[in-house]
Image (tube, rainbow, N blue to C red):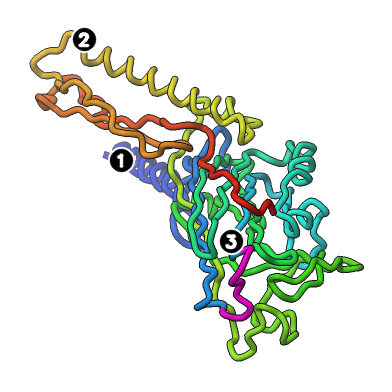
């Protein structure tokens, strides 16, 4: 009897230690370490959705009425480790960022990124937004060592004003964020001294630092964002990140995209399709094998649904139904819903009309 109690006590202690190991979190909440987003071999696909809100109703002062009308440049974004910074508030912008903020041209930025591949993981671009209010989307990848995202978009017309995000970590308390929305305010690159949207580009000498434009900064009545009667400017845009899919170590996708670039995303798409085909073969083996009366039986796969996107990475699904449930001792039912990547690795784009900024 004594021996039985001792065994039971040891078993309870073991269980308690195991639960403490996977759920302890001094800040609060549960963190399951087997799902920690900083573990090796994890690849995550996110969608970025940029929504701009530049309108005459929200920002009536100096609202551009003529050519060029209010619009936004293409967005250049990166995923990277904590060491890299695209820009940083209260610090001088790099020449590449200042050039983009003034002109919207990315050539110099691309050159600088080529020599910083050790810090970078993926690159993404969002199409231009042709009006003050609009939406632009893209997808990108992060992994456990490169969980931060940064991007920059020029406000057009403006001297050197832009919106962007500096080193936002999508891994929070050990878990990948499912969905997060961040308000965006106008930023000044500090390289041009114009105060209004249509000001000439007078070089600032010496150059200033990147800073947020507010209702009272710069403190000058001629500033296009100077609204001293209100305490805070409304956000001129917001960005939403949505987690789409997580790939774990067993599928080895991370090996294919260790140094993934935007233009090479086709390789990942092919890899994902290949893995899906391997899965199809395994399911077919289940369907074709000789089944007994106790085994689960399923129907044939339905046709694939249409791709969710005509350009960019999309999804399509197919399903099958249970014809006969599994009985005791029988083979379990296989997966009933299957998702496959489809579409194109290239981003959706629209040809330029008149101004090239």
Percent across and percent down for residue 177 are 48, 52
> Which labelled disc corresponds to residue 2?
1
Residue at left offset 38%, top offset 43%:
15
Q: Nearer the viewer, mark 3 or mark 2?
A: 3
**How crowded is the residue under tag 2: few (<14 C-alpha within 10 Å), some, or many (20+)?**
few
> Which labelled disc corresponds to residue 238?
none
Question: Residue reaching furthest top?
Answer: 290
Marks 3 and 1 sit apart, C-alpha to C-alpha, by 80 Å
Residue at left offset 64%, top offset 48%:
76
The local secondary structure at tag 1 comes to helix
What is the magenta segment's predominant secondary structure? loop
Residue at left offset 21%, top offset 24%:
332
Q: Nearer the viewer, mark 3 or mark 1?
A: 3
Q: Quadrant of the N terminus?
A: top left
Percent across and percent down for residue 218 are 74, 80
Q: Is residue 186 above or below residue 114?
A: below
Residue topped by disc 3: 71
Marks 3 and 2 sit apart, C-alpha to C-alpha, by 60 Å
Marks 2 and 1 sit apart, C-alpha to C-alpha, by 51 Å
Q: Is residue 81 magenta?
A: no
Residue topped by disc 2: 289
Query: Sequence-wise, which precedes: disc 3 or disc 1?
Result: 1
Looking at the rendering, the stretch of residues picked out in magenta corresponds to 60-68
Callout 3–callout 1 Cβ contact below 8 Å: no
The local secondary structure at tag 3 comes to strand
Question: In screen coordinates, is 194 left or right of 312?
Answer: right
Q: Is residue 63 magenta?
A: yes
Is 56 in front, or is 236?
Answer: 56
Is 252 in front, or is 95?
Answer: 95
Percent across and percent down for residue 181 are 49, 61
């Amino acid at each position: 009897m004594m021996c039985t109690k001792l065994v039971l006590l040891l078993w309870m202690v073991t269980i308690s230690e195991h639960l403490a190991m996977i759920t302890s979190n001094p800040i609060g909440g549960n963190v399951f370490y087997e799902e920690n987003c900083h573990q090796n071999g994890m690849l995550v696909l996110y969608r970025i959705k940029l929504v701009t809100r530049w309108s005459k109703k929200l920002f009536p002062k100096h609202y551009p009425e003529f050519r060029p009308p209010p619009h936004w440049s293409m967005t250049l974004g990166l995923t990277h480790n904590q060491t890299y910074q695209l820009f940083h508030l209260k610090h001088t912008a790099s020449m590449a960022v200042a050039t983009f903020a003034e002109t919207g041209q990315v050539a110099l930025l691309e050159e600088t990124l080529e020599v910083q591949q050790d810090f970078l993981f993926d690159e993404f671009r969002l199409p231009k937004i042709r009006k003050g209010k609009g939406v632009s989307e893209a997808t990108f990848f992060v992994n456990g060592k490169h969980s931060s995202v940064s991007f920059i978009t020029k406000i057009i017309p403006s001297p050197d004003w832009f919106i962007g995000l500096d080193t936002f970590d999508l891994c929070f308390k050990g878990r990948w964020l499912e969905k997060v929305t961040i308000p965006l305010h106008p930023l000044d690159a500090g390289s041009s001294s114009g105060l209004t949207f249509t000001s000439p580009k007078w070089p600032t000498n010496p150059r200033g630092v990147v800073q947020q434009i507010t209702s009272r900064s710069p403190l000058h009545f001629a500033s296009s964002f100077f609204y001293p009667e209100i305490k805070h400017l409304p956000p001129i845009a917001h960005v939403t990140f949505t987690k789409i899919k997580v790939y774990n170590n067993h599928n080895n996708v991370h090996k294919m995209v260790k140094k993934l670039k935007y233009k090479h995303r086709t390789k990942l798409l092919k890899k994902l399709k290949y893995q899906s085909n391997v899965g199809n073969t395994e399911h077919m083996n289940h369907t074709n094998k000789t089944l007994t009366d106790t085994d689960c039986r399923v129907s044939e796969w339905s046709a694939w649904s249409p791709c969710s996107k005509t350009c960019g990475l999309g999804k399509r699904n197919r399903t099958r139904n249970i014809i006969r449930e599994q009985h005791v001792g029988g083979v379990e039912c296989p997966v009933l819903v299957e998702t496959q990547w489809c579409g194109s690795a290239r981003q959706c784009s629209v040809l330029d009309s008149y101004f090239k900024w």
